[in-house]
Image (spheres, helix red, strand yellow):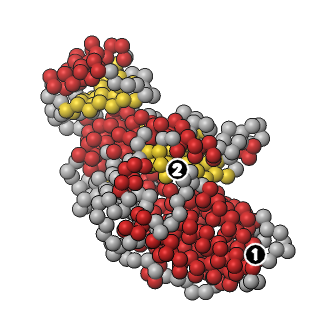
Amino acid sequence: MTLEVDQVLAWVHGARTGLADARRRIDAVNVFPVADADTGTNAWLTLEGGARAVDDLGAAERTAAEVLAVFARGAMLAARGNSGVILSQWLAGFVRRTTAAAADEPAGAVLAQALRAAARAARHALAEPQDGTVLTLADEVADAAVLGADSGATAPAVLAQAATAGHQSLARISATHPVLRRAHVPDAGACALLVVVDALVLAVTGGAPRSPAEWLPERGSAHEAQPGECGTEHAAAGGAFEVMLVVRGLDQGGGESSAPDLADGLRSVLGEVGDSVAVVGADGWWHAHVHTDDPAAAIAACAVGRREQVVVRRLDVVDLGVVAGPGRGWGLVVVTGSPALASWYATAGAVVVVRCPEEPVTAAHVRRAVEDAGCPDVLVVPGGVVSGHELESLLALDGVEVLGAHDEARAAVATLAFVTSDSAAPVHAAALATGRVRVAELAPRDAGAALDETVARLVVAPPSDDRATGTRPESLTVVVPGALEDALAADIEAAAAAHGLEPTILSDATADAVLVAVD
């Protein structure tokens, strides 16, 4: 093995802490592929997932190869955003070549070839790789390492030469990309990769760490680009929503390792519904990422295996902070069983976890979304698709409140109350709305005829929670199964007008009944 276990552990620790220190500076220069200022955070969460997996190995005797494999797999499963997917695949490529090295191969040559394999793997992860980005920087790092190894340099010298070449080429590479050149910033993904490479150099050489302050600008000091400069047209063309999910292959009787390779197929089908497509995988698991205007179509396209850990965010809403005004530090996570409603919840500012039929939503999936919300306090709206046992473990998390909204209608009402509240703690408004909402269920064939009578009954009915204060209802929320028919839409509008209610109509392809909620 080329690396010793203590060097691998030092790299894991150094990459984790290095990205934690640098992530805000990297976020500040993030303008491509979407100017959403989260590349540093996504890279850190990705490596943090790998580091946690290594932590879980415990104090037992571990080989360097075992630690590296766990690190790469953990990063792949924890990958966030396009940048995280690329970084996790770069790491996987590096680990595969390093752990496959023969005992008599020179360490410098192995590390150089590992950096070459990492660069190729990262490029292969994308459906449409672009030069002038982290991919080009990975090539430059690998080229420098190979030159050093060919000259007979030692492993520490090979890595040091590779890192130096990366830093020296960062500005030049970024200037070749039109979006980055107009914004006058380096590629954020390339910056994140340099932090990881620096950590590897430090782990092997034991030298002084390179502080991000030496080469990354302060947060907020990056060039303030005008609208259109930082790739906003590209973001709009690529899709308003980010969809990420894990797909497990359907094995052929020999376990996960016998499952067919789904990567190329996933890249192809996701490329038909969106942009910024990235797919990475190992051992029968694939992590897919896409920017799209149709999250439901992207989720459906991945039904070639067992889908889980499905997360949907609206790129231009979550990162702007719908509830991030002064004193409003609450984030929102909504769990839904309806891919069709994911876009509505995400547009309201939620990080959305979608349950697919193949796998249940676990507390780990929701915890991931809580981290993605990026707020000290987070309200979780379970939508009736998270089991009681999983919810109990969420209640133990600091800063997390779990609301008792156990169907899509109540989840929608809670979301509306949360995002329209003018209080410093919108969680209170959501909780009150959930307590006082009145919900009825209608068969689709009876909905039109029974709607007005049902709304009238709900308007005068007592609140469903005795603790809620009785106030005159103001809103009507109706969740209909499948596509909304014009006749039913007209009936809903008429019933709302007759009782002085503000209507919200949602279409849920997974529903069997019409849900009518009055708040």
**Front residue of 357 and 31:** 31
425 on left or right of 444: left
Q: Residue at x 33, y 45 (%)?
A: 347
Q: Left or right? Give the position of 217 relative to 9.
A: left
Q: Quadrant of residue 320?
A: bottom left
On the image, the x and y values in percent for residue 421 come to 22, 47
Position of residue 322 relative to residue 259, above or below, is: below
Q: Which x, y percent locates residue 83?
A: 51, 60
The residue shown at (21%, 52%) is 423
The amino acid marked with disc number 2 is Val
Q: Residues within 10 Å of mark 2 (few under 14, many from 20)?
A: many
Corner quadrant of residue 505:
top left
Count up the numbered dots: 2
The mark that comes first in sequence, 1 or 2, is 1
Position of 196 compared to 406: left or right? right
Secondary structure category for the residue under label 2: strand
Residue 36: in sight, yes or no?
no
Helix or strand or loop: what does disc 1 sit on?
helix
Rounded to the nearest angstrom, the CA distance separating label 1 from label 2 is 32 Å
Q: In the image, is residue 19 above or below residue 293?
A: below
- Taking the view exactly as shown, the residue that stands out farthest to the bottom is 208
- The answer to whether residue 93 of the structure is visible from this angle is yes
- How far from the left and from the top, in percent, is residue 309? 53, 46
Residue under the image location 52 percent in, 50 percent down: 277
Instruction: Give the quarter of the figure containing the N terminus.
Output: bottom right
Q: Residue at x 34, y 19 (%)?
A: 442
| Residue carrying label 1 | 109
Residue that label 2 marks? 277
Along the line of sight, which residue is nearer the eye, 464 or 350?
350
**Dividing the image into 4 quarters, which one contains the C terminus?**
top left
> Measured along the vertical axis of the image, is residue 134 above or below residue 243?
below
Which amino acid type is marked by label 1? Ala
